[in-house]
Image (cartoon, rainbow, N blue to C red):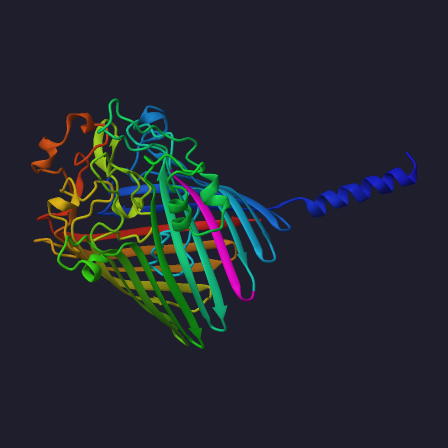
Amino acid sequence: MSLRPRLSMCVLLASLCMCAPALDLTLEGSGTASTETPNPVWLALDMRAVHELKDFSFLWDVSVSGDGHYGGLFGGSSPFGNATVMVREGGLLWHSGRFNISAGRLAMHDEVDSPYSLFMSSRGNAALNVLFRYEDDRFFFSDRWVALNYNSVDTAWPDRSAVIKNYGMKFGDLRVGFQDALVFTDKALLDWNTSPPTGGSRTPVFDPNYFFNPAPGILLQYAATSADAPWQTNPALNDNTVLGFFAVLNKGDMAYDAQILIDDINTNRFVHPNSFQNPDKIAWGLGASMHTDHGLFGLNTAGATKYTFEPAYDGSGNTDYGYTFYPDTQFMLRGVPTAIDPESTYLGYLHGENNLAFMASWNSLPGRLSGKANLEFTISGSKSPANPWGALLVYSDGGQGTKFLNDAVLEKKLVLGGRTEFLMGDWLFYADAMVGWVWNRLKLTSVTNDQQTTEPDHLMGVDRINGIPIYYPSSESSPIGSLTLGVKLLLK
């Protein structure tokens, strides 16, 4: 072999090595004791891999958990037992200058970095989604499509998606913005006043006009329903838009944020004060934080009126467009109907509707030994994230006027939580702890009112009106607590 081919081969190998994606692999193991999980003591394993190549990266994260919340691999009949195996995240990400594009099952976060963010839950829930984001010195914009649920084993669940957009401007230390979200399904409501009933469905659940058109969703929704136009969409489609505003101010060591989400405002109080008063459906959040020599201290509060994140029933059927990941409050676990944790199903504000929350928090300064703590107090009334108008068939049956924590019994919860981390080389040791008390704990309860029996037969079991259980404050009060000890190893 001549010298030139050898040199060419060396250059090629060197180029491949320089361009090969870097791999960061994180292994994690933990053990937990908790009063809040089906299994009081359980183990978890997690493996996360991140591959990076210049502006491009892709990641995947697989976990095995024995908490008992969900079923086991292969239905629990395998040698793995009832441990739940989940691909928590997996996706492709590209970042270059002012642009960010990502696609896959990835964690999602709000424009407002708050424990009580309203449009995207502060839990950082992961779902199949596609995100486009642009930001420069004065302007920022993001457009995200989310598959809420699709191809569900429960055939009564329609495929559902959301498109969430953020528009914002920067004025020195101040960021202000407008947010809107559209929730839509793959079905159209049936009109039972015609013979035969008309309506139909649409597929796929991805709507290109909602995602690729940067105009606000509320304009796209109503423009598409223009009467007597060739572009008019099926009038039986019943999508839902929520919108809101936010402001974030960073001034020296202080930071402030405010956010509001609006699904419906009762304008009749101004234009028709003597007529029917529909309920206001709004959520709000306020926060402040301060950097000190002893860490970051924060205060936050948020709340939401009743019905804010629910679907609706308009006499034709369940719209199923609630601001949630799932159109139900329970699923089948080993043949038994089991409650879905409310904070796991809300797409936005983690505590959901009919709630008021307060939190004081502290985060230590970065270092080998670090920690954080928070004290939270929440008050909740009944929640119906999937059953239209709660125990009512339609809001005219008693839903007039704004409702907020007016239940006869309310859940109260006081929780103190904290985390300590110790970094030693590539090893991270941590401990998570939570202790508190819950009064009148929310529990899933079946609806027991006359509307269930007077509902038209052709809707029973099809649109699931009032057949979906509701979270109600109960007579149960008890202490709550958990302790997790874990270790992470980073391999590069």
**Visible residue check, residue 261:** yes
Q: Quadrant of the N terminus?
A: top right
In screen coordinates, is 113 left or right of 286?
Answer: right
Q: Is residue 191 above or below residue 376?
A: above
| 97 part of magenta stretch | no
- Expressed as whole percent of the image width and height from the top left, the position of residue 183 reads 36, 43
**Residue farthest to the right, as pictured:** 2
Magenta region, residue range:
137-148
Q: Name the outermost residue toward the top.
A: 196
Q: Horizontal placement of 144 versus 420: left or right?
A: right
Disc tally is 0
Residue 422 drawn above or below residue 452: below
Is residue 3 left or right of 27 when viewed as pictured? right
Q: Position of residue 360 (x, y in %)?
A: 29, 67
The residue shown at (32%, 34%) is 236
What residue is at 91 percent from the left and 40 percent from the top?
3
**Residue at left offset 43%, top offset 62%:** 177
User: Of 242 and 276, which appears nearest the observer?
Assistant: 276
Locate residue 457, reporting x and y percent. 15, 26
x and y, in percent, of residue 232 in the image = 41, 38
The part of the image, by quadrant, that contains residue 466 is top left
For the question of whether residue 60 can be seen, the reply is no
- Outermost front residue: 228
Task: Please tell me whether residue 142 belongs to the stretch shown in magenta.
Answer: yes
- Residue 58, by quadrant, is top right
Query: Which of 461/285 is in front?
Result: 461
Magenta portion: prevailing SS class: strand
Name the quadrant containing residue 289: bottom left
